[in-house]
């Protein structure tokens, strides 16, 4: 549905934002690292391949040093990228699924349904979300799946609010009224008429949500609630915590990785925002 | 600085407007809502927590190093874990209504006592983090808006972006590494120096010293948000017609700032403050873990690992209550600042 | 000139001699600060027996005997003891003039009350020991006699303060033990009296002025500090805020830094009675674990020396079988399993291992155990065994073992000085029952082993017991019902001016009676 010239326009606006370009670049590097990890490292990040506590820049091939058991931190960074991106994207999709459905129904049908759904959303926003995530993961035993579901479950409210708001305003527009008059079924209207017009803000929100999801996942892993069979950046920082006095590099590099990834996602999100909503361009950029 | 003073007196004057029937009705309605939400949370947590495998009797028997089936049964009976689920639930909810949160068999003390012993530490930490984030955030945002386009603006924007993207627990660790381990300026953990036996002012100062790193790291994330938000809304407002009119009419710039710009810019900050409450509780878990701060965040985490149901529920209840209360206050404050907003 | 020089030499020698002598003579007085981790759930040793409780309350209560670092019995509340009738009658003579902390005298009636009425209610280990006893009687105010069904070698090893603390009859008889208010203010006969417990902060014990050994204890008081954070504990001893870090309260990575200091000393003694033995349960019920070759492959695949170096800072011993080298009747003349991945692979090939993944349950007590599990997982994967680590917390860990819902599970148990007390329970068929993580969780069942353990417990004299235990160790080392990993070493870290802290096989648990400060 997006015309070719619209796409060119979009890209031009996006590329004008230097921050967004930088973000995209970093994101690309992270993605490549994740995808090429098995090629870059012939061993698993859990293998004890060198002497423990090797400092960074000390030995050929071990740029980032080793951890307390002699595992290559560089390998951990690469394979950790896989987990971060996977969990970040999938949990965001879960949150989007829940939020879009609830928000669409609330905004389209209005009335009692809207009222009920909004109270429900408010209630969810009252519970401290990180605390709830911890409880959910601990209850369902930490694994990649339970982490994804837990993050999805605590992240959907802002999506629902956004989608509801969009639906509320779009529902009274002429093209929707026209469809109603023509006798189109409600679900068809929702899916084929209104939803596509809410895509832009949802996409922007999604990129910011992936960033938040990555932060959540690393926090859970840091506390020891991550999947014990996946090497994640948060886990690496948590494991290095007790030896931080002797080995700063074990916590430093994974943390930088998280920071750069999240930062780039935020930059890209803002770039998307500017590119998709040019009339809301802020002053002073 | 003068602007800060004027803002404050304006707020003070507005607060006398609360003696208003509308507002009392508003408070009443929201309080009733709050009670229902809390009850719902309690029931939800009750079932959620019991869905986890393993029970406290097994944990305690295991730690006694001696568990046999009879011993575990003995413990179960002691905790009332052998009663049917709905009976346990009724007993618990009944207790909550009288603010009796049950007994932590793990620690052999009433839950309420455990929580209220450690609550002040968390309130101190989150309160300090909140203040730091708002004050520094709004200040920096205003500064960036005032110097828009110049290097101060760029610097603040970039720094805010970075703090927004930084994982809380990691920056906490780096802060400990830098300021505590390397430079030795500040203590890296705890709320007070162990076994120092200080009193009075020296004790308070000791606590403040320990408070600096944790509250700063906890407040960083939202400080970044407030900074960017303040900057953006101030720039928006400055651009609006009525401000331009006022400028053209030759109104003193100071008056423009405090009557128009500041007042409008505060609204989104207040909204955000309400949201921050919930995040602060979660952030407290991480901060209290890294800094060994003796608050309820860490208490909750330990209670979860030990399957100390009553304690866990109690902490959830109290933190949700805190969030609801805080939201109530910010909602109310919102109406004071902008009378245009309806009290629904 | 020469005279002056000579004078200096003489004076220096004298001064040195005086100092040396001083170093031997305990100095009375002083307040000592110790760390306790985690905070004990209670101090009434008759009802609560977990680790921290034993450490603190072991100085408030006393048992009939103490045991030295070779596990030989020494007098405590009992001054003399006699074993007669072919090992079935034990007669103890009690010390006269011992008083409870409230002033009342301790007599044989207290001992009989403790053994027959109190402990069976709240002390699972004593309950089990007591099943060997037919009669407990006080012959007079200061003599107690235990009559056994048949000889039971380990019986004399069951009287340390944690296994059988003597409880005051005049306070507990006829009351509901669990709700007796004295539980909050424990009354014992020990060298230290309970004074105050500020929950979450510290426990304060003070010197028992009327203690039955003249001149002791030397210390005036003990403060047990609750410091939940490991890094904080390390700093506390570095800055002198605490004097002793009890076993289990220090992260192994901090140990080298601390012990490098001149004023901090470390000892591994004082755990001989407990001899914590760490192994991995193998669920013998399911394939591929039911095949002996798979279990032997596991033993060959694990690099236990590396684990000890990298995870436990070089501390601990490499076990050869079910009995620890610190426990009685240990024999290392058994099949050995040095680190040999090739042998492991060969065994797996021989049995036709098809790559079925196995689940590994780590001990959920902290970072060290998590690293331990990760190393073992990697070792096993390197020889081709597919391993998945299961994430769990304490409750889940207990539950999974109780329900036999695991393939491989880490655990460690205390040996209590005698194989009949601490070892047999893990390998005998009669102990296979759901509901406890401390019995035969792995499900190994061998009638010959059952017979050997049963006979060895009641054999007489010790030489006969050794013969039987040697045979059972050989069989178990061949069958590998569990994968023995490490004889754990939990050192005690203390300031060097704390003298004579560890003089028994249970270390700090009853060590403060002899300790003194050279300050």
Image (spheres, coloured by chain):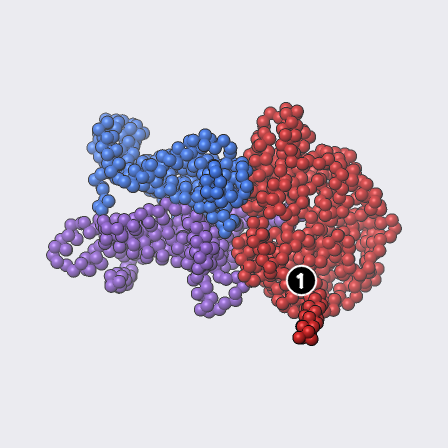
Rendered view: C281 above or below B243: above
- Counting labels gives 1
Residue C263 image position (x, y, % from top left) = 60, 60
At horizontal 78% and vertical 41% (from top left) the residue drawn is C469
Residue named by callout 1: C499
| Colour displayed for chain B in the image of the structure | purple
Residue B6 image position (x, y, % from top left) = 24, 63
Rendered view: A86 above or below C147: above
Residue A110 image position (x, y, % from top left) = 30, 38
Q: Nearer the viewer, residue B244 or B328?
A: B244
Residue A170 shows in this picture: no
Q: Dividing the image into 4 quarters, which one contains the N terminus of chain C?
A: bottom right
| Colour displayed for chain A in the image of the structure | blue
The residue carrying pointer 1 sits among few (fewer than 14), some (14 to 19) or many (20 or more) residues within 10 Å by Cα, namely: some
Residue C133 image position (x, y, % from top left) = 80, 50
Q: Tag 1, which chain?
A: C
Is A274 left, or right, of B207 in this rendering?
Answer: left
Is B219 left, or right, of A144 in this rendering?
Answer: left
Q: Nearer the viewer, residue C345 or A59?
A: A59
Among the 4 quarters of the image, the one containing residue C168: bottom right
Q: Dividing the image into 4 quarters, which one contains the C terminus of chain C?
A: bottom right
- Kind of element beneath mark 1: strand
Is A31 left, or right, of A137 in this rendering?
Answer: left
Rendered view: C20 above or below C481: below
Residue C511 shows in this picture: yes
Chain represented in red: C
At horizontal 71% and vertical 44% (from top left) the residue drawn is C324
Among the 4 quarters of the image, the one containing residue C280: top right
At horizontal 58% and vertical 27% (from top left) the residue drawn is C355
| Most distant residue in the right direction | C85
At horizontal 56% and vertical 52% (from top left) the residue drawn is C254
Is A108 left, or right, of C134 in this rendering?
Answer: left
């Amino acid at each position: 549905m997006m015309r070719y010239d619209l796409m060119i326009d979009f890209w031009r606006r996006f590329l004008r934002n230097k921050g967004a370009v930088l973000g995209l670049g970093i994101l690309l590097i992270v993605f490549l690292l994740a995808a090429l990890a098995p090629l870059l490292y012939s061993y698993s990040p859990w293998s004890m391949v060198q002497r423990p506590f090797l400092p960074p820049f000390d030995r050929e091939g071990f740029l980032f040093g080793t951890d307390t058991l002699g595992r290559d931190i560089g390998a951990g960074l690469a394979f950790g990228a896989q987990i971060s991106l996977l969990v970040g994207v999938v949990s965001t999709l879960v949150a989007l699924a829940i939020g879009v459905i609830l928000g669409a129904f609330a905004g389209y049908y209005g009335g009692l349904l809207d009222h009920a759904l909004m109270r429900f959303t408010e209630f969810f926003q009252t519970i401290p979300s990180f605390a709830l995530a911890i409880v959910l993961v601990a209850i369902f035993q930490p694994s990649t799946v339970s982490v994804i579901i837990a993050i999805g479950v605590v992240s959907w409210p802002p999506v629902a609010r956004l989608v509801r708001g969009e639906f509320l305003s779009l529902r009274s527009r002429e093209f929707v009224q026209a469809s109603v008059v023509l006798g189109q079924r409600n679900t068809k209207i929702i899916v084929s008429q209104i939803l596509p017009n809410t895509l832009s803000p949802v996409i922007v929100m999604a990129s910011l949500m992936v960033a938040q999801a990555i932060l959540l996942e690393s926090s859970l892993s840091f506390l020891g609630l991550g999947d014990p069979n996946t090497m994640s950046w948060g886990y690496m920082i948590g494991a290095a915590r007790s030896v931080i006095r002797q080995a700063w590099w074990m916590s430093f590099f994974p943390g930088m990785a998280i920071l750069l990834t999240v930062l780039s996602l935020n930059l890209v999100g803002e770039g998307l925002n500017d590119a998709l909503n040019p009339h809301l361009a802020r002053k002073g950029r | 600085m003068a602007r800060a003073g004027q803002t404050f007196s304006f707020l003070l004057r507005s607060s006398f407007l609360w003696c208003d029937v509308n507002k009392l009705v508003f408070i009443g309605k929201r309080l009733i809502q709050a009670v229902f939400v809390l009850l719902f949370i309690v029931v939800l947590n009750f079932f959620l927590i019991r869905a986890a495998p393993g029970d406290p009797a097994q944990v305690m028997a295991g730690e006694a190093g001696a568990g046999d089936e009879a011993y575990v049964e003995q413990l179960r009976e002691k905790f009332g874990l052998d009663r049917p689920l709905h009976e346990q639930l009724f007993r618990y909810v009944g207790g909550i209504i009288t603010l009796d949160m049950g007994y932590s068999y793990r620690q052999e003390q009433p839950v309420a006592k455990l929580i209220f012993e450690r609550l002040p530490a968390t309130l101190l930490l989150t309160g300090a983090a909140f203040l730091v984030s708002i004050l520094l955030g709004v200040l920096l945002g205003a500064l960036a808006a005032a110097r828009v386009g110049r290097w101060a603006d760029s610097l603040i924007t970039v720094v805010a972006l970075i703090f927004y993207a930084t994982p809380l627990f990691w920056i906490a660790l780096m802060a400990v590494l830098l300021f505590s381990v390397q430079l030795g300026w500040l203590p890296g953990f705890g709320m007070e120096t162990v076994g120092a036996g200080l009193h009075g002012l020296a004790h308070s100062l000791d606590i403040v010293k320990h408070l600096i790193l944790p509250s700063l790291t906890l407040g960083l994330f939202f400080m970044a948000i407030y900074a960017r938000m303040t900057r953006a809304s101030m720039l928006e407002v400055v651009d609006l017609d009525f401000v331009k009119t006022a400028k053209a009419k030759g109104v003193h710039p100071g008056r423009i700032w405090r009557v128009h710009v500041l007042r409008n810019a505060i609204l989104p900050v207040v909204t955000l403050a309400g949201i921050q409450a919930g995040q602060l509780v979660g952030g407290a878990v991480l901060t209290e873990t890294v800094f060994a701060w003796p608050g309820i965040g860490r208490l909750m985490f330990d209670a979860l690992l030990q399957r100390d149901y009553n304690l866990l529920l109690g902490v959830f209840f109290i933190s949700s209550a805190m969030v609801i209360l805080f939201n109530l206050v910010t909602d109310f404050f919102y109406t004071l600042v902008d009378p245009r907003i309806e009290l629904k | 000139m020469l005279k002056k020089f000579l004078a200096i030499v003489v004076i220096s020698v004298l001064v040195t001699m005086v100092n040396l002598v001083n170093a031997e003579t305990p100095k009375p007085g002083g307040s000592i600060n110790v760390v306790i981790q985690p905070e004990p759930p209670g101090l009434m040793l008759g009802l609560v027996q977990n680790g921290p409780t034993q450490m603190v309350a072991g100085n408030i209560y006393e048992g009939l005997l103490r045991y030295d670092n070779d596990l030989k019995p020494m007098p405590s509340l009992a001054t003399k003891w006699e074993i007669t009738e072919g090992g079935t009658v034990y007669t103890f003579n009690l010390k006269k003039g011992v008083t409870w902390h409230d002033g009342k005298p301790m007599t044989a009636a207290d001992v009989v009350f403790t053994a027959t009425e109190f402990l069976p209610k709240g002390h699972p280990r004593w309950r089990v020991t007591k099943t060997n006893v037919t009669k407990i009687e006080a012959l007079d105010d200061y003599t107690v006699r235990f009559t056994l069904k048949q000889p039971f070698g380990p019986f004399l090893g069951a009287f340390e303060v944690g296994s059988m603390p003597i409880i005051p009859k005049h306070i507990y008889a006829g009351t509901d033990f669990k709700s007796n208010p004295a539980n909050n203010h424990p009354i014992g006969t020990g060298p230290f009296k309970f004074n105050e417990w500020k929950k979450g902060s510290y426990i304060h014990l003070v010197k028992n002025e009327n203690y039955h050994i003249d001149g002791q204890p030397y210390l005036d008081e003990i403060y047990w500090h609750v410091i939940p954070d490991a890094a904080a504990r390390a700093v506390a001893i570095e800055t002198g805020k605490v004097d002793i870090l009890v076993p289990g309260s220090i992260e192994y990575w901090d140990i080298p830094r601390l012990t490098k200091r001149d004023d901090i000393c470390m000892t591994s003694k004082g755990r001989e009675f407990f001899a914590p033995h760490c192994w991995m349960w193998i669920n013998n019920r399911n394939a591929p674990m039911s095949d002996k070759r798979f279990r032997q492959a596991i033993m060959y695949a694990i690099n236990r020396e590396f684990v000890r170096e990298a995870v436990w800072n070089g501390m601990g011993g490499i076990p050869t079988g079910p009995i620890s080298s610190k426990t009685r009747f240990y024999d290392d003349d058994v099949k050995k399993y040095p680190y040999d991945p090739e042998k492991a692979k060969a065994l797996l090939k021989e049995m036709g291992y098809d790559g079925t993944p196995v689940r590994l349950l780590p001990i959920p007590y902290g970072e060290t155990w998590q690293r331990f599990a990760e190393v073992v997982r990697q070792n096993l994967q390197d020889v081709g065994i597919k391993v998945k680590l299961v994430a769990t917390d304490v409750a889940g860990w207990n539950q999974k073992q109780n329900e036999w819902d695991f393939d491989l599970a880490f655990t460690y148990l205390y040996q209590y000085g005698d194989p009949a007390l601490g070892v047999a329970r893990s390998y005998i068929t009669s102990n296979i029952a759901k509901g406890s993580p401390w019995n035969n969780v792995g499900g190994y069942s061998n009638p010959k082993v059952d017979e050997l353990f049963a006979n060895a417990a009641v054999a007489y004299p010790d030489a006969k017991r050794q013969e039987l235990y040697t045979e059972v160790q050989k069989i178990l080392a061949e069958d590998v019902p569990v994968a023995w990993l490490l004889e754990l070493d939990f050192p005690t870290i203390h300031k060097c001016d704390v003298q004579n802290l560890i003089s028994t096989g249970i270390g700090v648990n009853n060590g403060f009676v002899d300790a003194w400060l050279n300050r």
